[in-house]
Amino acid sequence: MRISRCVRWPAVVVAGALAATACGSFEGSTTSGSGSADNLTVSLQFTPRANYSLETDDAFVLSQVGCLETLVKYDAEAGALVPLLATEWVQTEPTAWDFTLREGVKFQDGTDLTTAAVVASLQYLLRADAPPRAFTPKLITSVEALNDSTVRIRTPEPSALVPFRLASINTGILAPAAYTGTGIDPLSHCTGPYTPVAQTPAQSMTLEGNTAYWGGNVPLKSVTARFIPEGATRATQVRTGESQIALGLPASTVPELEGDARIKVSSAFTPRTTGLYFNQSRAPFDNPEVRKAVQAAVDVESITASVFGGQAHPAIGPFAPTEAWAPDSQPVNRNLDQARRLLTAAGYAPGQLKLTLLAYTERPEFADLAAVIQANLAEIGIDVGVQVSDYSAIEPSLLDGSYDLALLSRNHLTDIADPLGFLTADYSCGGGFNISQYCDPAIDAQLSAANTENDPQRRNAIYADVASQLQADAVTTFIAHEQTTAARLETIESFVDDPLARYAVTPDLTVSNS
């Protein structure tokens, strides 16, 4: 059975509307099997590799399994911020936002959620060696407790987007005891509906229902989360019943899953774009003509039809045409003759360039995609070797600029639920994830203006202009606007495949006996 849904990405809420209201490692073994209506097993595509440090993508794992919660939540269906651990927020000064905490919330170790605990969690991020892109000392001046119920966030300049930053999964709140000095220990230290009780490192985690959850009774007695980078393996686990839910499935697995009456397959377009990233800190990609040659050689139409199985659209810049901040741009048509001319003009003869393309296994299509790009570039005389591994193995090369080409799938509403977070992190001169090593002071000025702009339509116009420039300068070869696909057994009820990859095991999710 196939279920499709369309998630709309409306203009974000203006500040005035918001102002009104609004591992350490731990030991143990996990259980297996998907057994009864009290138990759930879910297969996730990403493996925690950083001891659950909240400044890393490990935070998303803690959120997906129902452990970690933030002050504010972005409701993707509604396109609006909603309360979570904070019940309201208000901009009290041009550079200050006050957040009122929800009363009666306890951490899973029995201690109270206090303003001191919130301040400690957020200050931990600001002191991290590599703070999360949504919450850095460049963006946040200070975090302080005004009283027993209110936390104040100060910024270096007026910002309309602070509440969006507090909806970032990386700003999840843990109990003080979670911060051990040698890492993060999430065991019984979250506020969410499910409590981690054991793990097998890099393989699985076991959680139990939080009987003191502030949101009320939780339906499941236990949850087992399995970390399985291979998409085909995740699909197989649902077919065999070893898992009841599998996320991030490759297009190639969908037909067989749809043919099984016991399984429901769901998909939704996401604010996620696959791109071919260039290291512009060195030759040859410090030359825009070489980047444009590659851009003209990559056959995005064929790629989306074949590699993505028709479950993606050819990309026109970083944003899908349906998004409020997308520019009115035309696609880059494949033109091999033009690509060869650009390479010649840049001083490169056929066969002279020998490059390495990095891809990672957590995105199931990337191995095939890398092979297609390798063939595309061979047609214009560029020799490309492909290196495929899990993401944790290639990230150091991306961050230190020791790579040539890399495939990356970026959800541009993940850092914060507004394009500013993505554009600043990836394409500003000092961006925390500027793996392209791209720097244009004019774009920095535009992004700075967007940060202080309260009118969402004016912000969106800035984002559209920046996106047009990125496409025109071939800063990245944008390839595909993606869907997310998940599968679940028919006994699973109230599951929603989150297009922002933040939530999977929620308080509403249940398992029936049928």
Image (tube, rainbow, N blue to C red):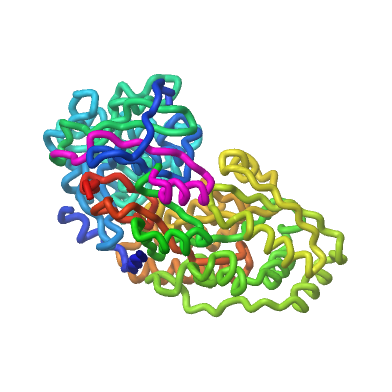
**Which x, y percent locates residue 223?**
31, 36
Where residue 393 sits, quadrant-wise, is top right
In the depicted view, which residue is nearer to us: 325 or 429? 325
> In the picture, which quadrant includes the N terminus?
bottom left
- Which residue is pictured at 43% across the width and 41% down the height? 136
Compared to residue 191, the image places residue 494 above or below, namely below
Residue 184 higher or lower than 266, as above or below: above
Q: Is residue 224 magenta?
A: yes
Specify start and end residues of the magenta stretch as a single range. Answer: 217-241
Give above or below for 59 relative to 179.
Answer: below
Q: Is residue 257 left or right of residue 3?
A: right
Q: Residue at x 59, y 59 (%)?
A: 440
Residue 150: tell me if it is visible. Answer: yes
Point out residue 464 in the picture as x, y percentages from the top left corner: 46, 70
Is residue 290 toward the left or the right of residue 444 in the image?
Answer: right
Asked if the stretch drawn in magenta spans residue 413, the answer is no
Residue 412 location in percent, x, y?
44, 58
Given residues 491 and 168, the one toward you in this image is 491
Q: How many marks?
A: 0
